[in-house]
Image (spheres, rainbow, N blue to C red):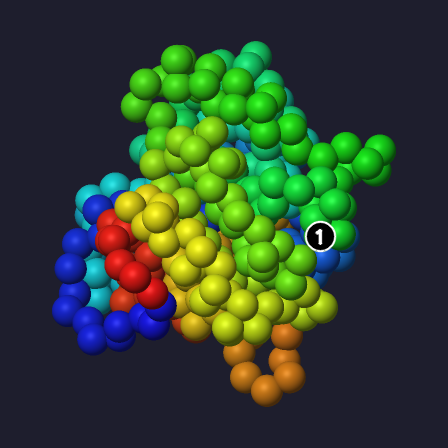
Amino acid sequence: MALDLSFTPRPAGQLVINWHVTEACNYSCQYCYAKWEAPDRQRDLVHDPVRTKELLVRLYDFFHPDNHANPLRQDMDWSAVRLNLAGGEPLLYASRLLEMLPVARDIGFDVSLITNGSRLDPGLMASLAPSISLLGLSIDSPRAQNNREIGRMDRRGRGLDIDSLARAVDEGRRQNPALKVKVNTVVNKVNQSDDLTDVIQRLRPDKWKVLRMLPVVDDRLAVPQQAFDDFVRRHAHLAAIRHVEDNQDMTESYLMVDPMGRFFQNVEGGSARGYRYSQPILEAGASAAFVGMRFSAPKFLFRYKPPIKATE
C-alpha cells in the first residue's frame, strides 16, 4: 500500500508521543530497533520519579494543543496529546509504570501502553486498565518455532501464551469498557507465510497494525516486497481493522523519545543505520531539543486514518 503524499493540513485529533522508557526486554527479537546509545552510562529516566515527572511536564507544555509556537502547528492541528509508553518491554518495570500513570494523567496526557504481553496477567491488567485508553500488543506469530527463531522467547525458552493473554485482555475490558486494543505485527523473513487470523479473532482488537520489518539496526530478517504484499493479501478478510505500514510509511512519521529523554529519529540514506538524537530535553528544554528533528505530518496523519476495505 503506497502512501499518498498529497497533503492538506487537517486535524490529527490526538498527537502521539512515543516514550520508549527502557531498552531492557525479556525477549531478544533479532530485528529489535530498541537499541540506543546511552551517554555516559546514563540510567533510564523511568527509575527516577522526579526527573520522569519533569520530562513529562516539559513534553506536555511543548506539545500542548494551545502552544501555537510549536513548529508542527504549521502543518497540523490537534486537540489532545497521548503519551504512548513503549520499550524494550515497559512491564519489566510495572511498579514504576503504575506510579507514573496517575502523574501523566494529572499533567494532561491520555496514556497508552505497548507490550509484548508476556508479563500481563488479569491482576496486573486490572491495575493498568483504568489508567490507559489503549493497550498495544506486539504479536508476530502463532507458531512457537517461529517465535523462537525471531527471538520472542525469554531465557527459559518461554514464549507468549495467547489464551493466557486473551484472559488478561478480557479482564482489562471488564475493568475499563472504553479500553481500545491494538495488535502490532512485524512481518519478517520468519513469519512471512503465517496466518494470524485465529490470533486476531481471539483477541478481538480494534486495530491490527501490519508493519514491514524496518532494518534500522539489523537487516537479517528483512522481508522482500513481494512476500510482504502476499502477507497483506492473505489477510484481506481482516481489512476492516487492519492498517498496513511499509518501510517508507514509518520513516519520520513517529514522535519518539528515548529512555534517556532525548528525541530521536531514524537515520536515512546510503548505508547509514541507527538514530539521530536531540539534546537531552531536561537540559535543553523540549523546544530547543526538537529543533532539527525531522517529522512528516502527512505520514503521521496517514497512520491514523481509519482502515478501509480494499483488495491489495
Q: Where is residue 62 in the image (x, y as percent from the top left)?
A: 34, 51
Residue 190 visible in the shown view: yes
Q: Which residue is drawn at 64% across and 84% down?
A: 271
Tell me where residue 25 sits by quadrant.
top right
Q: Position of residue 3 (x, y in %)?
A: 32, 70
Q: Give the amino acid type for the residue marked by disc 1 in the picture.
A: Ile
**Given the current orientation, which residue lies at the most extreme bottom position?**
270
Q: Where is residue 31 in the image (x, y as percent from the top left)?
A: 67, 59
Q: Residue at x 34, y 36 (%)?
A: 206
Horizontal side, residue 81 vs residue 30: left or right: left
Q: Quadrant location of the N terminus?
A: bottom left
For the image shown, how many numbered marks are present on the structure? 1
Tell me where residue 135 sits by quadrant.
top left
State the SS at label 1: helix
**Given the current orientation, which residue lies at the most extreme right position?**
156
Q: Quadrant location of the C terminus?
A: bottom left
Which is more toward the observer, 109 or 279? 109
Which is more toward the observer, 200 or 138? 200
Check the image and report above or below for 112 versus 167. Answer: below
Residue 281 visible in the shown view: no
Q: Mark 1 points at which residue?
A: 150
Check the image and report above or below for 292 versus 66. Answer: below
Q: Which residue is drawn at 67% across and 58% down?
A: 190
Check the image and report above or below for 61 versus 181. Answer: below
Q: Which residue is drawn at 54% across and 84% down?
A: 269
Q: Where is residue 306 in the image (x, y as percent from the top left)?
A: 25, 50
Check the image and report above or below for 210 versus 123. Answer: below
Tell me where residue 105 sits by quadrant.
top left
